[in-house]
Each structure stands twice: as structure tokens, then as C-alpha cells.
Amino acid sequence: MSRIRAKNEEKIIRAASRIFAEHGYAATKTAAIADLAELPKPNIYYYFGSKEKLYRAVLESMVEPLLAASEPLVEYSDPVRALTAYIRTKLLISKEYPYASKVFANEIMHGAPHLPQDIVARLTAQTRILTSRLSEWMEQGLMDRVDPKHLLFSIWASTQTYADFNWQITMTLGKEELDEQDFEQAAALITRLVIQGCAVKTAE
């Protein structure tokens, strides 16, 4: 039963991510989510209780990978290795969670009216940790002194755009969807810009 529940919850969250991304929170109908998930509408309330709780679950499905993405910057002492892994992980999130990323971005653009305070606190704490880590490498002479927060903003923008502005990117590339090669090229270029632009040196 637990496996069935987990499978159905995942189907509902993925369907809800797409519907919320395409229609916004206010205009989203739970019936549309149920139809896309190919489950009875009562299942939405059975598993999540309300539309508001389901929306939070969609946000959390994006927030948890974002928080986990910071692990290389904490785990690796070498900034080249850490930043390379961080950028690749952030792009992987855009690839694997494109609709949830749009929901998260839309929430932020509207002033985060539905973003729970505990999630805000966790994201804020993560930013402090990452900023401190970048500053530490700057103090060690392993990279140029730049504003660490603005460096993070640049990495977030350049990686998340592959989900949030997917339509614009695919239109420009003349294809229906991005493939593995597109993400590999993006990872290589963004990593090169960050590593060379900030004169990041290896510590190993």
C-alpha cells in the first residue's frame, strides 16, 4: 500500500506541477489535475487534503532538490570541482523538474504569497551557507573577490532559465524540446564562464 501511495502521490504532484505552471494557483482546478494524473478527483483530497496543501507539495518538490544541490559546495574543498558539480546539478533540476521550476519561479515573481515561512527560512539559511563558502575560497585566494551573492544570482539565473524560459530557448534552437546534448553544452559553457570569469583555481 505504501508503494501505491507513493506512486500516486508522485503522479499527482507531477500533474499538479504542470497545471499550476500553465494556469497559476488561482485558476487551477483540482479536476484538471486529476484528469492529467489519470486518477479520480477524490484521490487528490485523499492524498493531499486540499489544493493549498497540494500546491505546497509542488513547491517542496522543487525546494528539496534545490537544497540538495548545495551539497557539492559544502562537501568539496576544491572550488573548481564544487562549482562544476553545483552548476551541473542545478541544470539537472531544470531538466527533471521543468514545471515545478516554473511554479516556483512564478511564486517568487509574485512576492511568494503562498511560500510557507519554514521553506523561506531553509532557503535563506542555504544562501548564507553558500555565500560563506564562496567567501572562504576568496579569502584563500582560490578565486577572485566578487560579490558572492551576485555570483549565486548569476548561476541561478543561467541554470534555471532552461526550465523557466524553456519555450524561448526551444524556439530559438528550432526544436520541440531540449535534449541531453543541449544540457551538456549549457553545463560546459556556464561552468567555463564562472570558472574563468572568477579566476577559480583548483585546491587539489
Image (cartoon, grey):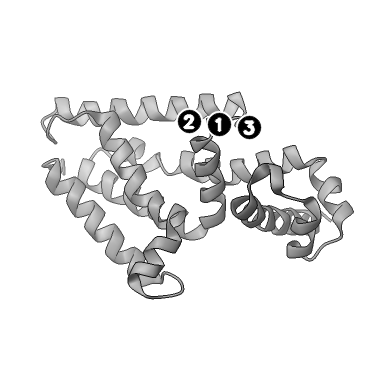
Circle 3 crowding by C-alpha within 10 Å: few under 14, some 14–19, many from 20: some
Q: Are marks 2 and 3 in contact (CB under 8 Å)?
A: no
Which percent across, then down, holds residue 186? 29, 60
In space, the residues marked 2 and 3 are separated at their CA atoms by 15 Å
Amino acid type at image mark 3: His
Which percent across, then down, holds residue 202? 15, 44
Left/right of residue 111 with respect to residue 187 in the rendered view: right
Amino acid type at image mark 1: Ala
Q: Residue 112 bears which disc, if any?
A: 1
Q: Residue 114 bears which disc, if any?
A: 3
Amino acid type at image mark 2: Leu
Q: Residue at x 52, y 24 (%)?
A: 121
53, 165: nearer the viewer: 165
Q: Secondary structure at mark 3?
A: loop
Chain-order first, disc 2 or disc 3:
3
Q: Residue at x 51, y 59 (%)?
A: 96
Circle 2 crowding by C-alpha within 10 Å: few under 14, some 14–19, many from 20: some
68, 119: nearer the viewer: 119
155, 6: nearer the viewer: 155
Which percent across, then down, holds residue 149? 29, 29
Q: Secondary structure at mark 1?
A: loop
User: Which quadrant is home to the C terminus?
Assistant: top left
Q: Are marks 3 and 1 in contact (CB under 8 Å)?
A: yes
Q: Name which quarter of the figure residue 60 lies in.
A: top right
Q: Is residue 40 above or below residue 160?
A: below
Q: Which mark's residue is nearer the viewer, 1 or 2?
A: 1
Which percent across, then down, holds residue 40? 87, 60
